[in-house]
Amino acid sequence: MKIGFIGLGNMGAPMAANLALRHDVTGFDPVARPADLTLADSAADAARHADVVITMLPDGKVLQAVAAQIHPAMQQGAVHLDCSTVDVDSARAVAAQAQARGLLAVDAPVSGGTVGAANGTLTFMAGGPRAAFDQVQPLFAIMGQKAVHCGAAGNGQAAKICNNMILGVTMIATCEAFALADKLGLDRQAMFDVVSTSSGASWSINSYCPAPGIGPVSPADNDYKPGFAAELMLKDLRLSQTAAVAADADTPLGAAATALYADFVETEDGAGRDFSAMLPRFASRQRP
């Protein structure tokens, strides 16, 4: 399969490298130039003659700008597979533009971070026509361990932001609870042993515990160097609130989590740290 891959940053480069072991991949990025990939001089050149063009881009504005460059260059019936995390409206706009040009489009944001990208263990949540999803399913199998078809265009993004809103809220609750346990004199290991096997269990404590030395190895054990950066959590939470406003959905915990991560990243010391570094934040604070 001929694949164009546009966006070769921390996520895109390892995803493209995994695909290049099995397929003919041509990549493009205006800044990154990975030595292990065949590179084009422009996004349009990477897309030309490709069966599938994959984009991994920072936001909806950039996605729409790149789509305007690559769609005219793509051959009829080719698939634009966007793996970026962007707003639902941008995903649906790009899908409509692709359809108008005789192309297929799938929005398939990912979960699993840079480790999942390198190891080929990502989870994809996909929106778009079932026929297009089936066409790119073999690529999902190379880049990840699971792909779920979530329905029409934009539904992949909807699934991603709903999932990450839950993640942001549960990580804050987990960090608050550990900080409270500390002040009540409850040992962190005892806290983990109880909660991880009780009704308070969640992925945030069981698989990604924010307390160093507790549970499976996580960024907390590496001085909170990012596995999933707090800035990215803030981006996803803001996307969830944009979607909530558009859909007239009441999401008070999502709104509160967004405000807390905004303070953490923009006015405190959260920039450049893992999103689980909320634990030392709460541990060092007193009740207002």
Image (cartoon, helix red, strand yellow):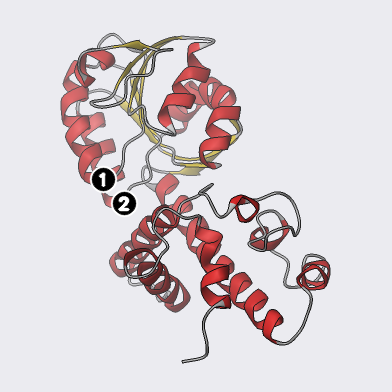
* Mark 1 → mark 2, Cα distance in angstroms: 6 Å
Q: Quadrant of residue 34?
A: top left
Q: Which mark identifies residue 60?
A: 1
Query: Is 147 above or below relative to 72?
Result: below
Q: Residue at x 55, y 55 (%)?
A: 224
Q: Position of residue 248 (x, y in %)?
A: 33, 72
Q: Position of residue 60 (x, y in %)?
A: 26, 45
Question: Relative to the observer, which residue lies in front, 241 or 268?
Answer: 268
Q: Which part of the image, by quadrant, shows the N terminus?
A: top left
Question: Relative to the observer, which residue lies in front, 207 or 66?
Answer: 207
Q: Quadrant of residue 175?
A: bottom right
Q: Residue at x 73, y 66 (%)?
A: 201
Q: Is residue 15 left or right of residue 43?
A: right
Question: Relative to the observer, which residue lies in front, 31 or 62?
Answer: 31
Q: Secondary structure at mark 1?
A: helix
Q: Position of residue 161 (x, y in %)?
A: 44, 55
User: Which residue appears farthest toward the bottom when viewing the image?
Assistant: 288
At label 2, the amino acid type is Asp
Q: Which mark identifies residue 109?
A: none
Q: Position of residue 87 (x, y in %)?
A: 31, 51
Q: Is residue 78 left or right of residue 186?
A: left
Assess whether mark 2 and mark 1 are in contact (beta carbons under 8 angstroms): yes
Q: Which residue is mark 2?
A: 87
Q: Residue at x 65, y 53 (%)?
A: 221
Q: Secondary structure at mark 2?
A: loop
At label 1, the amino acid type is Gly
